[in-house]
Amino acid sequence: SAWSLHVLSVQRGFSPGSPASSHTGGATSNLNMNLYATKKTAAEGMLDIALFLANITHMKTVIEQGAGYRYYAAVLTLISFSLALQIVAGVLIIIIGELYKIKVNQKRLDSLNNMTTIIIFLIFVTNIFISVFGMELDLLPQRQNGGQADLSLNSL
């Protein structure tokens, strides 16, 4: 998730800028860890935004197809559930980050981190189901010639 590196470091009791995050203790190693953590967090954030936008686009497509779409209600419900979970996970990640800044009890941070991990897993599973139900069989080659797919150039 977008802040999984930060959340993981909170769980372990490190922050990218703390001396404990550097194995060698040198300033150069600390700077490299900060750069790596920043780039990784930014890349994961972009992936999270891409998933969110892909779900919104998929929802728009399903709505445009209308109730005649085979799994209309199921896909629309799953996408809505996934979007809601993504928003909840994002809010929890922000809360964890803010609580970490004010030095809240580590047990509380760990429980919030575990809750966020469970929500992210549910997002993952939900998106698998969205992908399964979102596949249109009409896009597959039509079965002809005794069950064999006709993949000749003439059929395209």
Image: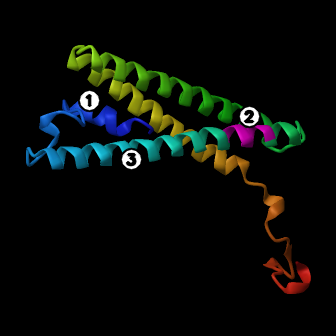
Instruction: Give the residues drawn in magenta, as a range.
Output: 55-60
In the depicted view, which residue is nearer to us: 5 or 146?
5
Q: Is residue 15 magenta?
A: no
Residue shown at 27%/42% (left/top)?
34
Q: Nearer the viewer, residue 88 or 139?
A: 88
The quarter in which the N terminus is drawn is: top left
Contact flag, marks 1 and 3 (Cβ < 8 Å): no
Q: Amino acid at mark 1?
A: Val
At x 22%, y 34%, the residue is 17
Front position among marks 1 and 3: 3
Farthest left residue?
25
Q: What is the chief secondary structure element of the magenta stretch?
A: helix
Instruction: Please name the amino acid that badge 2 sits on.
Output: Leu
Name the secondary structure under disc 2.
helix
Residue 22, position in %: x, y? 14, 43
**Disc 2 versus disc 3: distance between alpha carbons?**
34 Å
Residue wearing tag 1: 10
Mark 1 or 2: the one toward you: 1
Quarter the C terminus occupies: bottom right
Q: Secondary structure at mark 3?
A: helix
Residue at image location 37% in from the left, 37% down from the top: 4
Q: Quadrant of residue 147?
A: bottom right
CA separation in Å, label 1 and label 2:
35 Å
In the rendered image, which residue does mark 3 sit on? 39
Q: Position of residue 109 (x, y in %)?
A: 28, 21
Crowding at dot 1, Cα within 10 Å, few <14 / some 14-19 / many 20+, comes out as some
Instruction: Name the residue that disc number 2 marks.
Output: 76
First in sequence: mark 1 vs mark 3: 1
